[in-house]
């Protein structure tokens, strides 16, 4: 059922060197939406994404993904998640197709298939060129393809449009919407480009100094005639509060 939660975190905390970098955070992501995650550098976005994918273990709190406890059912959760977190790492001597084939073998599924996935990210004519020869934008497109090729229920994308030109940004925006509308995925994405979140997200979560301070639908913000979206987001990120 659409709108039921597919990701829920409760009182989440993560400590490094005796300091909480994520603390008392709560998040609810409805199924079938784009959840835009906003925050300043170092606010904790990537740390939360890493905990959602099991790359880091929480210090406190609970994480439930697809009805499963991430810490207890990590392998099951990972089969239902696709992710691009920080700079993607590939087998540099292999082609784009070679890298995707290895990923599908590892996941034990045919997914979308290599040719289809490459076409979806605009790399269908790249041929046998090794990834070591790819531009930053091409690497980012391939990282996105690897994230969704196995048809996960959830995509977690950390700054997915890094290195993309305006055409590439538009292509990925259309791709994300297609993955939701045609394939029933849920997408969590972070971006420093506020306009991209405005174009793409249904719901926005704002994290400040390690704590998710606000979750609100973009439609509610747009209903308020007395506030601009940019002002709203920056006010929350600077420690203010605006109700919707």
Image (spheres, rainbow, N blue to C red):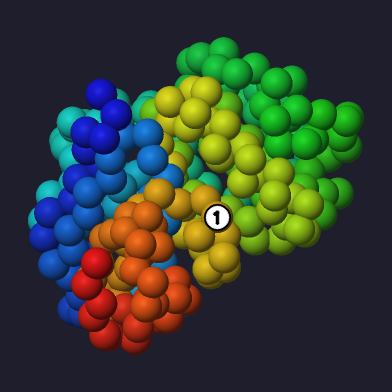
The vertical placement of 187 against 1, above or below, is below
The image shows residue 139 at horizontal and vertical percentages of: 72, 49
Left or right, 94 with reference to 214: right
Identify which residue, 112 or 194, lies in the foreground: 194
Q: Residue at x 74, y 20 (%)?
A: 115
Answer whether residue 25 is visible to the viewer in this image.
Answer: yes
Answer whether residue 49 is visible to the viewer in this image.
Answer: no
The image shows residue 192 at horizontal and vertical percentages of: 53, 69
Q: Residue at x 27, y 85 (%)?
A: 239
The image shows residue 232 at horizontal and vertical percentages of: 37, 76
Quadrant where the C terminus sits is bottom left
Identify which residue, 244 or 103, lies in the foreground: 244
Quadrant where the N terminus sits is top left
Q: Residue at x 64, y 17 (%)?
A: 113
Q: Residue at x 63, y 56 (%)?
A: 161
The vertical placement of 225 against 153, above or below, is below
Give the image quarter of residue 223. bottom left
């Amino acid at each position: 059922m659409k709108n039921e939660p597919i990701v829920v975190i409760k009182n989440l905390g993560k400590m490094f060197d005796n300091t909480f970098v994520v603390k008392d955070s709560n998040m609810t992501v409805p199924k079938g939406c784009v959840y835009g995650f906003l925050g300043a550098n170092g606010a904790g976005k990537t740390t939360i994404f890493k905990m959602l994918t099991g790359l880091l273990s929480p210090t406190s709190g609970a994480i439930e993904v697809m009805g499963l406890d991430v810490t207890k059912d990590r392998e099951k959760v990972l089969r239902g998640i696709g992710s691009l977190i920080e700079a993607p790492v590939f087998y540099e001597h292999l082609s784009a197709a070679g890298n995707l084939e290895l990923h599908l073998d590892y996941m034990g599924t045919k997914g979308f298939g290599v040719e289809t996935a490459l076409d979806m990210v605009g790399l269908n004519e790249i041929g046998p060129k090794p990834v070591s020869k790819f531009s930053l934008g091409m690497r980012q497109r391939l990282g996105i393809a690897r994230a969704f090729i196995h048809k996960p229920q959830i995509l977690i994308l950390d700054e997915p449009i890094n290195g993309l030109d305006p055409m590439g940004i538009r292509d990925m925006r259309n791709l994300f919407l297609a993955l939701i509308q045609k394939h029933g995925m849920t997408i969590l994405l972070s971006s420093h480009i506020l306009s991209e979140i405005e174009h793409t997200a249904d719901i926005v979560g704002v994290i400040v100094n390690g704590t998710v301070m606000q979750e609100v639908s973009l439609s509610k913000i747009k209903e308020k005639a007395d506030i601009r979206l940019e002002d709203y987001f920056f006010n929350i990120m600077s420690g203010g509060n605006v109700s919707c």
